Amino acid sequence: MTMSSTEPSPAPDPRTLLRAAQAAASEGRIADAVDGFSHVLALAPESGPAAVGLCRALIEQGNHDAARAALRAVIAHAPTHANVLAVAKEWESLADAGSLRSALIGTGTLDALGDYLRVAAAQADLPLALHVGGFDQWAQELADPSSPLVAHAPEIVFVAVATEALLPRHADDAFASDADLAREREDAVGLLAGLLDGAATRLPSTTFVVHGFSVPEHAPLGVADPASPTGHRPRFALVDEALRAMAAERAPRVVLLDQERVEASHGKARIREDRMWYMASLPWSETFLPVLARAQVRLLRAAKGRSRKCIVVDLDNTLWGGVVGEDGMDRIHVGGTAAPGNAFADLQRVLARLKERGVLLAVCSKNHPEDALPVLEGHPGMRLRPADFAALRINWEDKATNIASIARELNIGLDSLVFLDDNPAERGLVRERLPQVLVPELPRDPAGYARLVRDLDVFDTLAVTAEDRERSRQYAEQRERKAFEETASGDLHGYLHGLDIQVRIDPPTPANLPRIAQLINKTNQFNTTTRRHTEAQVAAMADSPDWMVRAIDVRDKFGESGLTGVAIVRKDGATWEIDSFLLSCRILARGIEDALWLHLAESARAAGAERLRAWFLPSPKNAPAAGFYEKMGMAAAGGEDAGAVAWEWSFGDDRPLPTLPPWLSITDNT
Amino acid sequence: MKPMDAQMEARLREVVADTLGIADDEVGESLSPQTNPAWTSFSHLTLMSAVEEAFGIQFSMDDMAAAQSYPKLVALIGAAA
């Protein structure tokens, strides 16, 4: 019998494979289950059941990282409602000591938003241990000292109270008097304030994110509303003002989420799904839930200091239309009132606004400098000039090498960078060679560029500090410092004396607290413990007699570096222990860290402490701080797994403290 | 009332199994909130939504309140499709 030619075997049916993998899992054949679910996902990456099955099987094998990756992958591929709800439950079970303890309380059925929040936060690499409050239990949870909210000990709490719950007359009563409205407004804001203040006594380091009140979709008077003395939007504007004042008084413990803007942007008509609202008090539709959760995650990231710091842009067809090396400066399109020049000018305006907030701009372009620089310097349509950029790479080298070089020059991590380039090949190259750089996909049409950059939410911070506003200028000053250092060539002490460095040691104040928190959350290299405290937590430490918080402000003859170092010490009777010790890398290697350490040691000794302790907890980035405590003369005092080392200075033996570097001038402002 | 064809019912079983997070063979005549803990009042709404999307139909509140077992769900889809 002759053999028939080989027929292709029928493609495996994902459903059959899924059933087989599920059977394997329930029979305890975990390795088979892992293989089976992985096969299903290779054929059908959108399969929620396969991702959940794979996640559980991997957890059985002890591989939590791969389990998490599987959950992220299916949501990245297919964030359907069913997938989000299924995956959220798995994230709940994966919550561990590394998860960010948080809570969601408010009015209505919150479980669905809780699930979307869990998933969105996990996708943003901020897995949560989330407590979702009971139905309409928000006031009790805030007021009761033994509530589940308090027991959960959250770092961040979202408070989502519906407008109609506290402001029904504002929403519906067209003929309410100003007095009635004022009373309702004061009662609503007053109730919130009272409950938040009470909760703060039990949760002193917690940040409360209050969803602001939003203007309802329909004005009771319809088209007559603008002519009415008690118009809808004016009355809600007064509410907004009162709420902002309440939050400002309590900053940083209380932060507002701009619910009105999020709803307006999505479309007021699409916020609620009527049947689900009537049947189950679900306040938000399936299309709005992910939008609201994303807004919450933006605030989570901002509270934890997870923001990118620099945007690197290409020139040809990114900052202007055309290729200057081919078209010449006169024929490229930028500025003016006609397309596409106006679109490119708009993109430059958006970048300039980012720069004003503290985001650094840099250029990476394949061009002859003599072609590109004249455009930057002199083309009348340009909104950005060379001085607006903290670094420029205009050459013919590959962009990945250039971008890595920019990161080194600016002394920031690759994970702090965003790269914009109209050329898909360049985008692909940088994504492959430098995966930590964020490379957004650009639309082909430059009409979409400005919107795309505005929609980037990776630069969010809770506050814009004076240091942020000055950052771009400080990079220019740093270039001058480097030039001076080059002239000093070799005479280090001469150079350091010549800098005329002034160091001021400050106590924490409401004014410098945002910057202190910002530094704590973004400093990676010279950071001995890398503990990420929120601003509310630092505020609680600042108010506590058991903690000492110190900031250092540095200036030299080239300019102000500003608040660039933080130390936090826990005072535990005879032992003072350094919880956090960090300095911006811009001010290292000048002895400033020595001065800060001396201040802590002298304070401890003067207070009668017997010893100063400090841990070094190694991280992937903080090798520069590893030898510091030993250099200051502390003695090794034990260690733990994974390279953690304890150090100690004992005051009992009366050993003289190290001396202050002579080229520093210190002012103690505490 | 149009009876459901085999292909449609196979699809329905998949949607029900995936949405409730149960195995395909748990979906049958006896499936209801009383017989399977995965079918809660909350997952019921998710299920209604998933079925609507899979079959391009819309249920009224009364429909959704009535669809409290697998056979009742099948009947409901037959009426709506």
Image: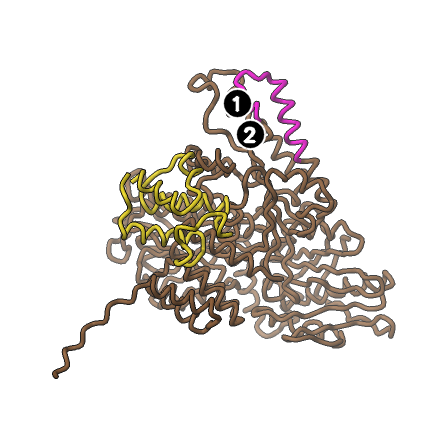
Q: From the viewer's perspective, is residue A48 above or below residue A159? A: below
Q: Is residue A99 in view from this perspective?
A: yes
| Residue ID for mark 1 | A172
Q: Secondary structure at mark 2?
A: helix
Between A43 and B81, which is closer to the camera in this rendering?
B81
Chain letter belonging to callout 2: A
| A296 to the left or right of A428 | right
- Colour assigned to chain A in the rendering is brown
Q: Residue at x 29, y 51 (%)?
A: A444
> From which residue to which does the magenta span run?
A168-192
- Decide: marks 2, 1 in contact (CB < 8 A)? yes
Residue A187 lies in magenta, yes or no?
yes
Asked if marks 2 and 1 fall on the same chain, the answer is yes
Q: Tell me the SS state at disc 1.
A: helix
Which shade of the palette goes to chain B?
yellow
Q: Which residue is mark 2?
A: A164
**What's the amino acid at mark 2?**
Glu
Quarter the N terminus of chain A occupies: bottom left
Instruction: Please determine whether, in this image, residue A233 is positioned above or below residue A444.
Output: above
Is A106 in front, or is B6?
Answer: B6
Image spot of residue A322 (x, y percent): 27, 52
What is the x, y in percent for residue A227? Answer: 47, 16
The residue sitting at 42% across, 34% down in the picture is B62
Q: Residue at x 29, y 48 (%)?
A: A445
Model colouring: by chain
Coordinates of residue A466 in the picture (x, y in percent)? 60, 48
Whichever of callouts 2 and 1 sits on the residue coming sooner in the sequence is 2
